[in-house]
Image (cartoon, rainbow, N blue to C red):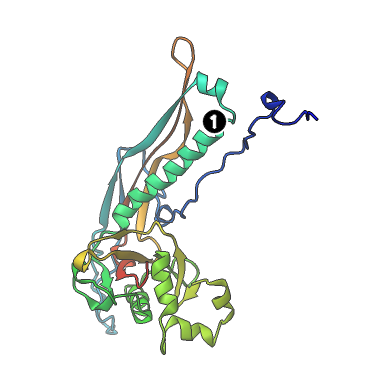
Amino acid sequence: MAFTDTTAMAGLVTDAYDQAVENQNRHAVLLRALPDKHVVDPTHVGDTYTLFKYNDLATGSRLLTETVDTTPIAVPDVTPLTVAIKEFGATVQKTKKLDLTALAGVNPIIVDLLARDQAVSLDDEVGTLAYGGTNVVRAGAKGATNLLTTGDTIKAVDFRNIITKLRENAAMPRRGDLYGVYMHPRVALDLRTETGANAWRDDHKYTSPELFWSGETGVYEGGFVVESARMKKANDGASSATVYRSLFFGAQALAEVVWEAPHTVIGEQIDNLRRFQTYSWYGSLNWARYREENLFRYESIAATS
């Protein structure tokens, strides 16, 4: 008996493909959201902007004598901060033949990839600035990054200490009455698993036990914790141990000046046969450390990897 089956009609049986193409997993981009000081009232457009902070009057006794007039107090000079223009961008060029032969739409993929590239690239630029500075606390009270070694993990006492330093510096909180804390998930894990009195686990065990089941770090000791695996790590500890950087910050730690906001640019088809199409992102902006005392870097080793 002969069957008219998939072998007999093999020419009509083909592989099928899903035309909806998904992106790869992506880590959260955090640092571009850190700068929150912006130009408020510019005099005009220039290739640099100078931001100013005015300083408080010198303190002293303000006791008055009934028959003696006050002595005028000099107002101190302002403190300037200059931010120069920078340009950023990237371009993808697509051919017409790809449009004619691709089984799925290519344009949405290109636009999405460029948007991701924009976010990551600018995040890295901010990170170069944010991870610098002299305000640094290290686990185990180590005096240098290359001294950090196994066991130098984040401790709740360090968390409290940095929040206290921000308060001592009169740093305004970033969200409500909370300071911001960005850290790698491995560092957050160490914070959540530290045991003993005055550690995160015991604090939450008796006050917010529901957080154990969701695995959230959440709000702790005056800081709201946000995690991303994009937070900086480098093999620059003792014996090339991996050192993780966390950031603790208040309001106006970094400034951002924007000449032209980052955006997508679709280029004109200027070749003879109009076969080539460019897609780009472009932005003109720059950043600076505005209130140095409002930003701390914390360095630690992760207990697990």
- SS of the residue under disc 1: loop
Residue at image coords 31%, 62%: 291
The one of 62 and 129 positioned closer to us in this rendering: 129
Q: Residue at x 46, y 54 (%)?
A: 27
18 or 111, which is in the foreground? 18
Disc 1 target residue: 106
In this rendering, the answer to whether 224 lies above or below 270 is below
Q: Residue furthest top?
A: 272
Up/down of 205 relative to 229, above or below? below
Image position, residue 75 (x, y; %):
26, 64
Q: Nearer the viewer, residue 265 or 90?
A: 90
| Residue found farthest to the bottom | 197
Residue at 29% in and 54% down: 129
Circle 1 crowding by C-alpha within 10 Å: few under 14, some 14–19, many from 20: few
Quadrant (top left, top right, bottom left, bottom right) of the N terminus: top right
Q: Residue furthest right?
A: 1
How many numbered marks does the figure carry? 1
Q: Look at label 1 and name its amino acid.
A: Val
Residue 2: where, in percent of width, then height?
Answer: 78, 28
Q: Residue 238 appears in which quarter of the rendering?
A: bottom left
Residue 199 screen position, x and y as percent: 42, 84
Residue pictured at 48% horizontal, 51% vertical: 26
Q: Is residue 274 above or below residue 109?
A: above
Q: Quadrant of residue 85?
A: top left
Residue 180 visible to the viewer: yes
Left or right: where 45 falls relative to 275: left
Residue 254 at x, y = what percent?
35, 57
Residue 289 in view in this figure: no
What is the quadrant of the C terminus in the image?
A: bottom left
